[in-house]
Image (cartoon, coloured by chain):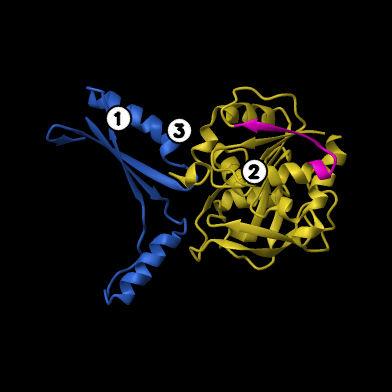
Chain colours: A blue, B yellow
Amino acid sequence: MKAKVHVRLKEGVLDPQGAAIGRALGQLGFEGVGSVRQGKLIELDLTATDSEAAKSEVEAMCAQLLANPVIETYSVTIETEGRST
Amino acid sequence: MQAGVITFPGSNCDRDVAVALEAAGASVTRLWHGDAELPKLDLIVLPGGFSYGDYLRVGAIASKAPIMKEVVRAADAGIAVLGICNGFQLLAETGLVPGALIANVGLKYLCKEVELDVVSINSIFTTMYDPATSIHIPIAHHDGNYVCDADELKRLHDEDRIAFRYRDNPNGSTDDIAGVLGPGRNVLGLMPHPERAADPITGGTDGAPMFRALMEALA
C-alpha cells in the first residue's frame, strides 16, 4: 500500500517561499490570491498489509524524521486499492 | 582542552574550525558522523556546511546520524557543544537548543560580515566578550531565519539564553537572534562563523575570543 504524508508549516510560522510564490502570481496578473503557503508531499511505498498498523508506523516516521513539530504539522493518508483512509 | 570536530557528509567548515581551535591551544580530534562512540572530550563542535545537501529540512538527516545519540548524551552530561551554522541547524533538530531555522526572508543565500551584539556573557563561550562592544563576524547561509514561539522566546529572555543578536537583522530571525544557549548553558548554536574571523589574514579576529574563552574554561 501507499502512504502520503502532507507536511505544512504551522499557522503563524512565516513562509518566505509561499510569500514569493504569491508575489510572482500577482506579477503574472492573477488577482484575488490571498496568502500562499508552501508545504511538501512525501509518498511512501509500504510492504505493510494492515492499513491501521501502516498508519501508526508512518506517524512514528513523521514524529522522528519527516516533520519538525517546532515549525510543522503533518497529516497521513494511507491508500489501499481504491480506498483512502 | 580536548576538542572533537564532527564531519558529516557535506560539512565544509570542519577543517577551518579545527584550525581555529588549534590556534587557541586546543588539541583537536576529527570525528566521523558514522562513529558510534565518542572519545573523552571537553568540547564537541558541529561545523558549518550543507550536510546531506539540506534534504528534507536543514540539519534533519544529519541529526539522526549514529554519533548524534552520543552527542546528545554528552550534552546532557554537561560536556560543551558548539554548533555553527549547519551545526546550529542540527542542534535545533536534535532539540539541544530550542527553535528551528527556516529560509531567510529574502530567500537569498547571504554571505557577508554582520555586526553582532553579545547579549549574554554568562556562558563558557562568551566570557571574553564585552557586552558594550559589538563584534563583526561573517555569515554564510540560506536558512538562518530563527523561529521560536512566544513562550519559548520569553523563556530565552527570562533565562538570559540569547547569546548573540544581529544589529541589522539579515534573515528575518525572531527577535534578531543570531545565537542561543541550551537550557544547561553548555550548548551554543549560532549562525555566524567565528572560525572565519579567528586569524587576521581573513579580515578580522572577533571570533577568536570564543575559542580562547573555551580554552580557558575547559583547559
Relative side of A24 to B117, left or right: left
Q: Is residue B208 above or below residue A30?
A: above
Looking at numbered disc 2 in the image, what kind of residue is underneath it? Pro
Q: Residue at x 71, y 45 (%)?
A: B17
Give the image location of residue B140, x and y in percent. Answer: 61, 57
Give the image location of residue B89, x and y in percent. Answer: 57, 46
Q: Is residue B213 above or below residue B218?
A: below
Q: What chain letter is assigned to the residue under label 3? A: A
Q: Any magenta on residue A51?
A: no
Q: Residue at x 87, y 40 (%)?
A: B216
Q: Quadrant of the N terminus of chain B?
A: top right
Distance from label 2 to label 1 (Cα)? 36 Å
Q: Secondary structure at mark 2?
A: loop
Q: Secondary structure at mark 1?
A: helix
Could you tell me if residue B121 is visible in this image?
Answer: no
Classify 10 Å Cα crowding around label 1: few (below 14), some (14-19), many (20 and above): some
Magenta segment range? B22-32
In the rendered image, which quarter is residue A36 located in?
A: bottom left
Relative side of B50 to B83, left or right: left
Give the image location of residue B20, x and y in percent. Answer: 77, 46
In the rendered image, which quarter is residue B82 located in?
A: top right
Distance from label 3 to label 1 (Cα)? 14 Å
| Residue at mark 2 shares a chain with residue at mark 3 | no
Which numbered disc covers residue B47?
2
Q: Quadrant of the C terminus of chain B?
A: top right
Q: Which residue is mark 3?
A: A64
Q: Secondary structure at mark 3?
A: helix
Q: Is residue B54 above or below residue A61?
A: below
Relative side of A82 to B69, left or right: left
Looking at numbered disc 3 in the image, what kind of residue is underneath it? Gln
Give the image location of residue B179, x and y in percent. Answer: 67, 52
Q: Which residue is mark 1?
A: A55
